Image (cartoon, grey):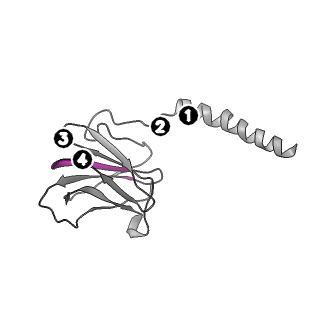
Amino acid sequence: MRTMRVRLSRVAVVFGICLPLAVFCKSQDRFESGKYKGFTKYSALAIVELREPFIVREAKGIIQYPNGNGFLPNVLVEIRNSSGTIKATKTDSQGRFKFRGLREGTYMLKTTLSGFQSVVGTVLLQKNAKKSEEIKIEMPLGV
């Protein structure tokens, strides 16, 4: 009987606390205007803007902890083309991501993970870029 009460208590906590919070909290708020328009936002975290663009053949890469101390899985990686269309993916267990079917051009890339600052940068997809180059981003811890 005691085991049953513990299980019921946990269910009550999940439905009593978490469900109401989910109703009042939006899970996918997006920037409505400005240079981040359309990207997912997390209001509690800062955004780090990279100065140098990534010049690559393919929109693929790796997301790491600060100072390259390991890989970050489940990072939301979004890429937006010049017309405002956004594609998104998540990093795998090794922190890797890849976007397929993108044409040459200039894109804006944004990474987001709870507990970390988002990172935004420019990606230039060019056929004549070095084949071995890939996007490497270190995500700073959140504020």
How would you rate the neighbour count of disc 3 (Cα within 10 Å): few for under 14, some for 14-19, many for 20 or more? few
Please tell me the numbered disc located at residue 22: 1
Residue named by callout 3: 82
Magenta span contains residue 108: yes
Q: Amino acid at mark 2?
A: Ser
Which of the two labelled residues, at mark 3 and mark 1, occupies the earlier sequence position? 1
Image quadrant in which you'd find residue 82: top left
Cα separation between marks 4 and 2? 28 Å
Mark whose residue sits in front, 3 or 4: 4
Residue named by callout 2: 27
Cα separation between marks 2 and 3? 26 Å
Task: Locate the N terminus and report the quarter of the image it occupies.
Answer: top right
Which of the two labelled residues, at mark 2 and mark 1, occupies the earlier sequence position? 1
Residue 60 left/right relative to 44: left
At mark 2, the secondary structure is: loop
Q: Residue at x 26, y 62 (%)?
A: 134
Residue named by callout 4: 101
Is 28 or 89 nearer to us in this picture? 89
Q: Amino acid at mark 4?
A: Gly
Please tell me the numbered disc located at residue 56: none
Magenta span contains residue 74: no
Cα separation between marks 2 and 1? 8 Å
Do tag 2 and tag 1 residues touch (Cβ < 8 Å)? Answer: yes
Residue 129 left/right relative to 120: left
Which of the two labelled residues, at mark 2 and mark 3, occupies the earlier sequence position? 2
Q: Residue at x 22, y 42 (%)?
A: 81
Q: Which residues are magenta?
A: 102-119
Is 141 or 16 nearer to us in this picture? 16
Residue 81 left/right relative to 111: left
How would you rate the neighbour count of disc 2 (Cα within 10 Å): few for under 14, some for 14-19, many for 20 or more? few
Cα separation between marks 3 and 1? 33 Å
